[in-house]
Image (cartoon, grey):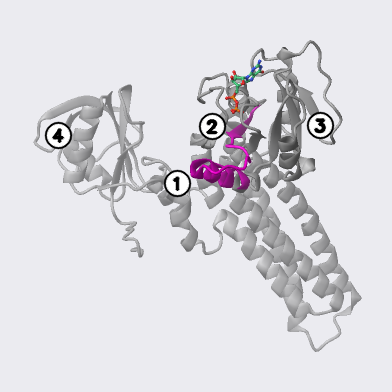
Amino acid sequence: MPRADGYQLGDSIVALATAAGEAGIGVLRLSGPRALAIANILCGLPAARSWRPRHAYLRAFYGSDGELLDRGIALYFPAPHSYTGEDVVELQGHGSPVLLEALLAAAVAQGARLARPGEFTERAFLHGRLDLAQAEAVADLIHARSRSQARAALASLEGRFSEGIDALRQQILGALALAEAGLDFSEEDLGEAHMAAIAQQLQGVQQQLQTLLQQSRQGAKLGRGARVALLGRPNVGKSSLLNALAGRDTAIITPIAGTTRDILREEITLNGLPVELLDTAGLRQSDDPVEQEGVRRSRALLARVDWVLLLLDASSGWQAEDATILAELDAQRCTLLWNKVDLLPAFCPPELGPPSFGISARTGAGLADLRAHLRAVVGGEDSAPYLARQRHVLALEAADNALQEAAMQLHAGAEELVAQGLRDAAAALGQITGAVDVEEILGEIFSRFCIGK
Ligand code: GDP
């Protein structure tokens, strides 16, 4: 199956399945029609030697010059009962980067091609071992940054999300069959009963789709984590707060105004939800081109965050510049933080609209309350039934729109258009699991995997 990018399903591919670096064990994985023949040569055996499936052999591994490299475990998973659905061989040797590189080179010398990122999983998808949403869940599980993410990614990999999508798609196809049956008899009076039956099915699928949409939005949010921007005049303590929340010394903290010129990122986990904190250069007017660039980036960033923390200096009080910044913010998505309360004998935040807290990045006062508040505003749930991606949410939204269109057309009595709406909805859902043609998005999805998976 040659593709425009030179992809050949008939190739035998090879990669190290374990991370680069020294480790107890390192695994080289081969997949494809020649996997076993190549493995035999690497193990110093006749190319046609057959292996017992899923049996752990202790074998010698040889380099391309025939020199003994290592001795380790060799396993054979014959097609179609393997990860990729093809013949797969795993050679498990000592986790020495030098030996593993030599073994990899020997496999390539015998005709294996180095696998592209995600190619093992892409093959699993192309051979029907996983659907597309499950294949994506493999990558999400590997890249999970919290237990909640890992748990939700596993649920997707186990097929919980795909099952919901497939069931809904089947029901839509059922309603479509009903609508199309009506089209075949278009000359006759279909009658109220037929229309009512379609209407009832349509209503049922619309309701289920709403549930799936809401769950996948939750799953997508858990997957990407929340993004929170820290804003405020120079020197109010943004970098200090970022470090205090992250428990690390990342930013350069100096008492000179305008030190933080670039956007600093720090990831914290709030009760299972990864939160990316972005410390921006602020929105201060400046003649310095470097600072102006920082301000421009801060503005662009604001459009993409879930929440904004506007930091104020409690020791100097409310300033005109603070008001200018607040005016640029969405009051529904921001919290005012009065920092440096340690410099005052007592502090009570003034009432300015958005929720307000008194904190000290230096002493840590008020930070526990701030964390709880942030957790509540950026993501109420600390779990999702499964992990989803923005791609899935968009497809569900497209299906939702198509179903609304179908319902409207049904009301208008235009059955042909009802059928079209249902067809569009089924196609949109089919893109999620790869049940309909998704060739053009495969490269995009699998290129983000790591090599060897
Ligand atoms: P930024 O420009 O907003 O990033 O501010 P920095 O984090 O660089 O802090 C500016 C100055 O304020 C530094 O000297 C910090 O040590 C000081 N600072 C930050 N937070 C606090 C705080 O909670 N209390 C006190 N007393 N000083 C603070």
Residue type at tag 3: Pro
Image mark count: 4
The reply to whether the magenta stretch includes residue 273 is yes
Residue 316 pos. (x, y %) = 73, 23
Looking at the rendered image, the disc whose residue lies closer to the viewer, 2 or 4, is 2
Q: Quadrant of the C terminus?
A: top left
Q: Which mark is residue 355?
A: 3
Classify 10 Å Cα crowding around label 1: few (below 14), some (14-19), many (20 and above).
few
Q: Do the residues bearing badges 4 and 1 touch, measured as CB atoms within 8 Å? A: no
Q: Whereabouts is ligand 1, in terms of quadrant? A: top right
Distance, label 3 to label 4, CA atoms, is 66 Å
Q: Read off the residue under disc 4.
A: 63
Q: Which residue is mark 2?
A: 260
Q: Earlier in the sequence, mark 3 or mark 1?
A: 3
For label 1, the residue is 448
Mark 4 Cβ and ligand 1 under 8 Å apart: no
Above or below 70: residue 436: below
Give the left or right position of residue 270, taking residue 50 as reference. right
Q: Which residues are magenta?
A: 272-299
Residue 49 position in % (x across, y down):
20, 41
Mark 1 near mark 2, Cβ–Cβ under 8 Å?
no
Task: Decide if ligand 1 comes within 8 Å of the CB at mark 2.
Answer: yes
Provide residue 188's location: percent of width, then percent of height.
83, 87
For label 1, the SS is loop
For the residue pair 36 and 375, the one nearer the viewer reads as: 375
